[in-house]
Every structure is written in structure tokens, then in C-alpha cells.
Amino acid sequence: MKSIAASVQARAVSPERQAIIDLSAISKNITALRDIAAPAKLMAVVKADAYGHGVVPVARTAVAAGAQWLGTAHVSEALTLREAGLHVPVLAWLHTPSTDFFAAVAQGIDLGCSGWELEHIAAAARAQERPARIHLKIDTGLGRNGSTMADWDALVAEAIAYQDEGLLRVVGVFSHFAVADEPHRPETDEQLQLFREAVAIAEDAGADLEVRHIANTPATLSRPDSHFDMVRVGLGIYGLSPFADQTSAQLGLIPAMTLQTRVALCKDVPAGQGVSYGLGYVTAGATTLGLIPLGYADGIPRIATGGPVHVNGRSYPVVGRIAMDQMVIDLGPDGRSHFASAEVPGSALGATAVLFGDGADGGPVVEQWAAAAGTLNYEVVTRISPRVPRTYVGGPAGTNGPGGRPANEPGGQL
């Protein structure tokens, strides 16, 4: 009885499920990517809550590791960085007519501009008598935001007119690649040529550019001719590979997120036992099932049946349909014998279950879950929901959890 009480008390300080974020891995990834990009500067892209890793701890780590810029999609994300005391250059590039351009200008946030935003940014600058900093975006082929080449001359002329009024400074020109993760595709060369032309037009019109930038993670790794003054690295700083035929380890990157929980139930079932909604999986013989308390509400793709779960040195595929809060693994007919030294001898109950991590111990990696779901590693980490606590280990001084505790100390979870 005493041992059970002690075990319950010990577990109470550990999350039932958690995404462990290794900030030292992020720091090492940034150092490696800075070396590849040099002499170009590095922008650490921390949009979407730093790809699910936690925007403030990751941003602090990135700056401490030498990232000269931070990048977000939305102004609201950039304002969060300012509120956290991060005063390095920050660029936000995806806007709507409801975007708070006034706050962005007030906080010295650089703004991407595709065309329509220009008068809104100028109005915010005029109201504050403070010039805005803008990066003009040219659509070189991705077909999302950015000015077309047909409209580029007019956009540049309008921006320079506002610059002459003292309302803004055109400090950058940028674009985004469509297929840099497929290095054999010719479209990347075509986009680079258009980008060079757009930069020349802006400079000839009077733009004194601080940064020209188009390279994302795959281009940073494979196209040194695309580095220009700065590279924008997202996926790579989290230690994941953008290439289908190269692993993180082959690129010298370390995956930073480990997603784990504890086995919630372990039970023996007979042959013919259906598992989960729809009963799409039926046991072939007597076996042991393990219940994993993570589901699509936690960000696990519902369609990712077959994704691996690592328990006690072995990986088991998820069987049956993934539910909102849980999924099931089949431990096999001799499943109990694998857990002789478990907390509950002869049972997987309470054992640590790892869905993905850095793969260093032979455990599963994000890409296996992406394959099971028919998606990309980007999506798997980004969709891990706020219901899963982030626990931070490693990292620079000042990357703190609640109450000012260092993130690698107990209680340093965000």
C-alpha cells in the first residue's frame, strides 16, 4: 500500500502526457544552419507557436543561439514576442484588413507588403509620426501572397513615394519558393531569376535594401545561390528534414520534440475482439491490448492508424481507429512477458509510451507518423494541441517556465 501511494505521489508531479522540447537541440540546429548560411543572416521562423514547440521559449533560444531575426505569419504573433521582451528585428507578413498595423508600427515590427496593405501601413505611420519598415513581397511563382510581376513596378513606385514622404522605409524585398524541397525541379531556378529582376527594379527605384530573402529551410540546405542577405528557416530549427530522401541525422539536425504519455490500461483479450470505433481491427488470437491516452483532440491525426508507439524498447503500431482521447496498441500474445520489471510487474500499465522523438534509441520519429497520416512532418508537430503540456529541457539562461524557474528544472513547464 505504501509503495502504491508513493508511486501515485511521484507521478502527480509529472504530466500524464507531454511534448518534451529540447531547447539545446534547437540551439544546436540554429548554430549548424547559421554556419551553412553564412555570411547571410538567419531568421528563425516561429509562427504557429513555433511549429507547436512554444513561441517564447523557442524565440529566446533562437536569439541566444545567434539568430539575428525572428519571423511570424501574423502581427499578433509578433506582438507576443515584443510582450515577452524580445526586441530583435521581427517580420510579420500575412495580413487582413483587420490587422493591427498601428500596434505593429508602434512596436517596430517589420511588415511584409504585397500591395493592398501599403496605404494601411502608411496611415498607421502617419498617425504616429513614426516611419514603418516594410519588406515588399514579389510572387515569383508560388501563387499565394505577393505582388505579381505585372503590378510590381507600380507597387515599388507607390512605396518609394511614401518613403519620400518619410512615412516608411523599404528595407527588404522577399519571396517564397514553391518546390525547393524537390531540388531537381526547374521552377526554383525560374523563381530565382524573377526574384533577381524584382530586386533590381526596387533598387533602381531608390530602395536601399537591408535584406533580400527568399530561401526557406530546403533552399538554405541545398541552394547556396539563394541565400542573398538572409535565409528564413522554420522546419530546420526544429530538427526536421524537408526532404523526402534525407533524414534529420543525415542533415546534421536534431529533432527537438518528443511526444510521450503513459499506458493507461493493459488487458488480455480473446481472439475475435474488435478494437475501437467501427471495429475495423479484430484480434487474430488471444493477445494483450495497451491503451494510449492520446487522440485527435491532442493533435494526433485520426487517420494515422499504424503509427508507431514505443513502449519498453519495442515499437507497436496503433490498431483500430484513433479516437478523440485515446488509441490502442496490440502488445501481442506474449505482451506481458515484456514487462517483467515494469512498475506493475507483468503489465504495461504506467509504462512510458513514446509516439515520436529524436530516434536516437531506435524509437519512432515524426516522419513515421506523417507517413501513417499521409501528410508531412510539418503538420504532425504543428498540430499537437495545447491540451498536451510542453515541458522544456536544456536551453540558454533566461528561457524560463512559470514563476521564473529555468525550463529544465521541475515546474518549468509552459
Image (tube, rainbow, N blue to C red):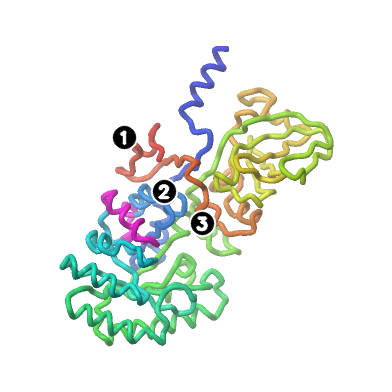
Rendered residue at 44%/84% (across/down) = 193
The residue segment tinted magenta is 63-85
Say above or below: 357 vs 201.
above
Q: Nearer the viewer, mark 2 or mark 3?
A: 2
Q: Is residue 287 found left or right of 249 in the rendered image? A: right
- Residue 343, which numbered label? none
Q: Quick check: marks 3 and 1 in contact, CB under 8 Å?
A: no
Circle 3 crowding by C-alpha within 10 Å: few under 14, some 14–19, many from 20: many
Secondary structure, mark 2, is: loop
Q: Is residue 339 covered in magenta?
A: no
- Residue 54, which numbered label? 2
Q: Position of residue 136 (x, y in %)?
A: 33, 75
Secondary structure, mark 1, is: helix
Callout 3, which amino acid?
Answer: Leu
Callout 2, which amino acid?
Answer: Gly
Q: Quadrant of residue 166?
A: bottom left
Q: Position of residue 94 (x, y in %)?
A: 39, 66
